[in-house]
Image: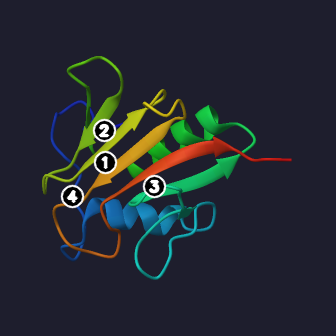
Amino acid sequence: MGAGNSGHFKGTRGGRSRVDVNADKMSKRYPVTQNGYFGQLGKNSGVRVIYSTSPIWTAKHFYLQISAGGHEVTLSNGRGKQAIFPDGSRVIIRLYSKSGSPAVEIRIIKSGHIKTQKIHFEERKK
């Protein structure tokens, strides 16, 4: 996933954030609102939710797509991974968050369409 053998970041065209470019590619499976957010409003302020029949698989799939082109490292506490982009933006995955559900956090430095947000992946209720 990340930088490849050379250790260098893969660039983007037109000065867009790599996360924005990745989000465009993901938009059919994971729609983005006009305001730049994935999923639905969560119960807590600032938290989004994507419902799935397999939350862990969906969180991993989402992370792999949104983090493409970033340099991946393990979090210092060992409880997840993060992809770091040349502009300083980060995408973090924790398979077990404090709430118990998998979570992906997107921290955007370079302004673009996608906004900084935390997304929880929860089981779709039947």
Q: Nearer the viewer, mark 3 or mark 2?
A: 3
Q: Quadrant of the N terminus?
A: top left
Residue 35: assigned label: none
Indicate which disc, 3 or 2, sits on the residue closer to the N terminus: 2
Assess whether mark 4 and mark 3 are in contact (beta carbons under 8 angstroms). no
Q: Nearer the viewer, residue 16 or 43?
A: 43
The span from disc 1 to disc 4 (Cα, nearest Å) is: 8 Å
Q: Nearer the viewer, residue 1 or 124?
A: 124
Residue 44: assigned label: 3
Indicate which disc, 1 or 4, sits on the residue closer to the N terminus: 4
Q: Residues within 10 Å of mark 2 (few under 14, many from 20)?
A: some
> Which residue is outermost to the right?
126
Query: At which x and y percent is residue 8?
Result: 15, 41
Assess whether mark 2 and mark 1 are in contact (beta carbons under 8 angstroms). yes
Q: Which residue is mark 1?
A: 69
The span from disc 3 to disc 4 (Cα, nearest Å) is: 35 Å
Tell me, what colour scheme is on the image? rainbow
Q: Residues within 10 Å of mark 3 (few under 14, many from 20)?
A: few
The span from disc 3 to disc 2 (Cα, nearest Å) is: 32 Å
Kind of element beneath mark 3: loop
Q: Is residue 80 above or below residue 4?
A: above
Indicate which disc, 1 or 3, sits on the residue closer to the N terminus: 3
Q: Which residue is mark 4?
A: 11
The span from disc 4 to disc 2 (Cα, nearest Å) is: 12 Å
Which amino acid does the dot numbered 3 rest on? Asn
Q: Nearer the viewer, residue 126 or 80?
A: 126
